[in-house]
Image: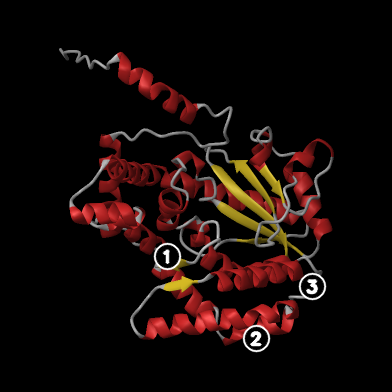
Amino acid sequence: MINDISIEITQSNIKKNRAAVMAKINLQNNMSQGFRLVNVKDYQQKLAQLKQKIASFEYQNSANKKQDESILDIMTSKNSLHNYLDQNTKNKIASGQQDNASRNQISNAQLKRKQLFMMFMETIEAQESLKEYAIKIASVSNGIVKQPPGAYFGVKDFHGALDKITNRKRGYDIGDLKDAARMTIIFENTDDMVAAKSMIALTQEFSELQHFQSAMKDRYGTSTGDSAKYNCGATDAGYKDIKFFLKMNNGNIGELQLNTKNMMAAKKNGHIIYDILRDGGTLDKPFTITNTEVIKKVAKNMGDKWFSFIKNRVPKANSSLTEVEKLVKRLNGNISRGNHSLTVDLKEIKALSSVSLCIYEQGDNARVLLD
């Protein structure tokens, strides 16, 4: 005979937590994949299964093994959680003077890490379904499917996904992470892209979410009538695309982007500026980049070839390139001295923003960026 165990929860705690919890699980107001509670037994079992898989499974794809090893390291290494905390909390941990705010941030990061781990296999399934969906759309609309690089059909890197919901968008819940499964279809012209958009709008995957205004973001402004609510204009950097959020057959939400070849060429060359400015907040004061991954990207991608491309294909940006060249030169000097950080001042912020706008302006200009 199993004895029942009663757990008493005070009415004050119920009242305190009810509003917050109901806001998370009420999917009528916000497009979300829901709020997940983590069962300790299930979590420990999945973690043990991952360890066993890495130890004994014969991987045919080395990227998949590398991703699994990275996940295991993030879930088990003693200091890995520090990567998902802000500097103030790190300082309080080091000094042994944690307050309620730092404790809450640590608990929040720990929970999100477990939630993402428990959801990751479902995300991989959604990524595979999204790939097949994109192939079907592209096959009847003269499109080319672009699968992101990386493991498991190009699903968002585990570290990148966790970094997004802990560092870059700390206010996000796990259900707000809707771009972990992602795919892109590229078109020669906007006519074919708009035709594909019209087909996607009729599918079940979109219809389940279409009552949310954010279910589609038409940055080209091609939507009319009742769908005009999806028009939202270019990003602050000048980038355009048509983005859908789609509910896949396992319930997970995936992101499908539509774009032209020329705008994708602009994105290839302009995204590095986004990487630099992303940590600058409102961009109204100097800021310092300490993320080593961003530093490596800038050093690798903003070399002579990049500057030559901008000078030749985006001549309107030339007046601002001098400041950017100084910035990159200073970065390379820092790296040579073992200093993997970069401070960006207001003049450089303005120059980077100007170059970005010029690049994406050309991206909206037929085939000017294509060889």
Residue for badge 2: 308
Nearest to the observer: residue 179 or residue 187: 179
Label 1 or label 2, whichever comes before in sequence order: 1
Marks 3 and 1 sit apart, C-alpha to C-alpha, by 34 Å
- The answer to whether residue 56 of the structure is visible from this angle is no
Q: Residues within 10 Å of mark 2 (few under 14, many from 20)?
A: few
Q: Nearer the viewer, mark 2 or mark 3?
A: 2
**The residue tagged with tag 2: helix, strand or loop?**
helix
Which residue shows up at 81% across the image and 69% down it? 366
Using the image, determine if residue 213 lies above or below residue 195: above
Nearest to the observer: residue 346 or residue 66: 346
Q: Seen in the image, is 246 located left or right of residue 327?
A: right
Which residue shows up at 29% across the image and 45% down it? 102
Q: Name the mark on residue 63.
A: 1
| Quadrant of the frame with the C terminus | bottom right
**The residue tagged with tag 1: helix, strand or loop?**
helix
**The residue tagged with tag 3: helix, strand or loop?**
loop
**Amino acid on which disc 2 is placed:** Ser
Q: Name the mark on residue 34.
A: none
Residue for badge 3: 367
